[in-house]
Image (cartoon, grey):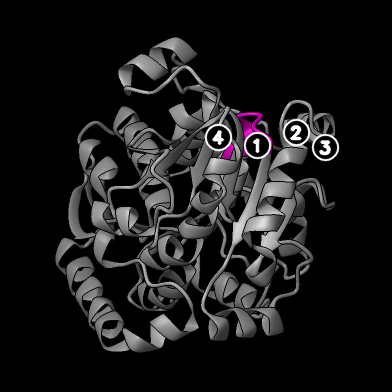
């Protein structure tokens, strides 16, 4: 069996790596080519395009890089034709993958889409594209199953893959974590500023501007290999910050609270039972357009799934030093919101609990 997997971001690389591992257990001789990253490569995929070259964020940046994006479509089609896979697997990355799905359908390749585009948030008409172009849709949020039913689309839901990933994460003790990473024995504040260059530029300076107001804590940034270390250094506004690469789950597991950029990382923090403040700041034009087309009340997955403002969201101008200090104080162990967040997380665990999601997808494949 031959599989071509397309993931365009760090989270897709992670999910893809777990999926490849299970595919190999079912089909040890499976041939896998992919657009992905180091994690997928470690599981045996031949990487045809690395995610480092693919993360374009926001309406403006997409327009600025349109020529490169169009070249990527052409390259991807060429590689699929040459490989001639039995199945093409799309992982998230909707701006690219939905367009590729049309071509894949037209050329008679079977397709599976894992992790639905946020069609329930904006551009709900894309649900019709999924119905027409995708052979099997696998969703990861409980409310997505009902959403797709309205469009006559039957989807599979096995729970959220992060539940499996976090359950299987080998937790080190706090003492081991500090010793292995040359950290102090102070309690930690996790800082997750995102995995794109624009996010580091817009969000990290504000996150680290408040560090010296909390001297009893050590702030630890979860760095990603897709971002040059110099870019982190340029945007860190305090000397009392540690930067660790490839340690995101260890940081979340050993922290007291977190400053978390909106996106999948908000859910990861919640599943580690970590109280958090959700942060987002982007380019003015992109954010203005997003506000016009968005159909959701919240930007964090925690609040979307629970359908209530469980965690505080600081967006655009609300993400500033004073607000961040105030909201972080509220979620520390003696803060007024600490217990309420913990109770909400218990509800979240029940909604998302999964049973071998990657194994179930591999079985479908």
x and y percentages locating residue 142 in the rendered image: 72, 47
* Residue 34 in view (yes/no): no
Q: Is residue 177 above or below residue 336?
A: above
Q: Is residue 279 above or below residue 127?
A: above
- Mark nearer the N terminus (3 vs 1): 1
Q: CA distance from mark 4 to mark 2?
A: 18 Å
- Mark nearer the N terminus (1 vs 2): 1
Which residues, given as a range, are shown in magenta? 268-275
Residue at 70% across / 85% down in the picture?
A: 292
* Residue 190 in view (yes/no): yes
Residue at the disc numbered 2? 345
Which is nearer the eye, 162 or 199? 199
Q: CA distance from mark 3 to mark 1?
A: 14 Å
Which is nearer the eye, 26 or 196? 196
Say if mark 4 contacts mark 2, CB within 8 Å: no
Q: Is residue 116 above or below residue 364?
A: below
**In the rendered view of the protein, which quadrant contains the N terminus?**
top left
Is 107 left or right of 93, judged from the image as shown? Answer: left
341 falls in the magenta region = no
Say if mark 1 contacts mark 4, CB within 8 Å: no
Q: Secondary structure at mark 2?
A: helix
- Mark nearer the N terminus (1 vs 4): 4
Q: Secondary structure at mark 1?
A: helix
Q: Secondary structure at mark 3?
A: loop
- Mark nearer the N terminus (4 vs 2): 4
Q: CA distance from mark 1 to mark 4?
A: 14 Å
Q: Secondary structure at mark 4?
A: strand
Circle number at residue 189: 4
Residue at the disc numbered 1? 270
Residue at the disc numbered 3? 337
């Amino acid at each position: 069996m031959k599989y071509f997997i397309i993931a365009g971001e760090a989270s897709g690389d992670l999910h893809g790596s777990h999926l490849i591992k299970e595919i190999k257990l079912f089909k040890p001789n499976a041939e896998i080519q992919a657009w992905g990253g180091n994690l997928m490569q470690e599981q045996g995929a031949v990487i045809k395009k690395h995610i480092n070259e693919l993360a374009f964020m926001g309406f403006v940046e997409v327009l600025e890089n349109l020529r490169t994006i169009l070249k990527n479509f052409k390259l991807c089609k060429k590689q699929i034709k040459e490989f001639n896979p039995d199945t093409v697997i799309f992982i998230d990355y909707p701006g690219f993958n939905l367009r590729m799905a049309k071509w894949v359908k037209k050329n008679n390749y079977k397709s599976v889409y894992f992790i639905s585009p946020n069609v329930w948030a904006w551009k709900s008409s894309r649900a019709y594209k999924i119905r027409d172009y995708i052979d099997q849709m696998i969703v990861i949020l409980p409310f997505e199953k009902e959403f797709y039913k309205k469009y006559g689309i039957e989807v599979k839901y096995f729970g959220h893959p992060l539940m499996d990933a976090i359950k299987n994460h080998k937790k080190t003790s706090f003492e081991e974590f500090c010793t292995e990473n040359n950290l102090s024995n102070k309690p930690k504040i996790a800082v997750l500023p995102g995995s794109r260059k624009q996010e580091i530029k817009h969000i990290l300076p504000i996150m680290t501007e408040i560090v010296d107001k909390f001297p009893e804590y050590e702030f630890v940034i979860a760095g990603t290999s897709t971002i040059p270390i110099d870019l982190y250094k340029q945007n860190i506004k305090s000397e009392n910050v540690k930067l660790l690469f490839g340690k995101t789950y260890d940081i979340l597991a050993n922290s007291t609270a977190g400053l978390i950029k909106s996106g999948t990382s908000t859910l990861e923090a919640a599943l580690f039972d970590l109280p958090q403040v959700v942060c987002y700041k982007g380019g003015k034009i992109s954010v203005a357009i997003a506000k016009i087309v968005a159909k959701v009340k919240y930007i964090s997955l925690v609040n979307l799934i629970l359908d209530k403002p469980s965690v505080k969201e600081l967006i655009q101008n609300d993400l500033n030093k004073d607000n961040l200090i105030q909201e972080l104080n509220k979620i520390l162990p003696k803060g007024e919101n600490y217990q309420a967040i913990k109770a909400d997380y218990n509800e979240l665990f029940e909604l998302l609990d999964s049973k071998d999601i990657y194994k179930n997808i591999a079985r479908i494949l």
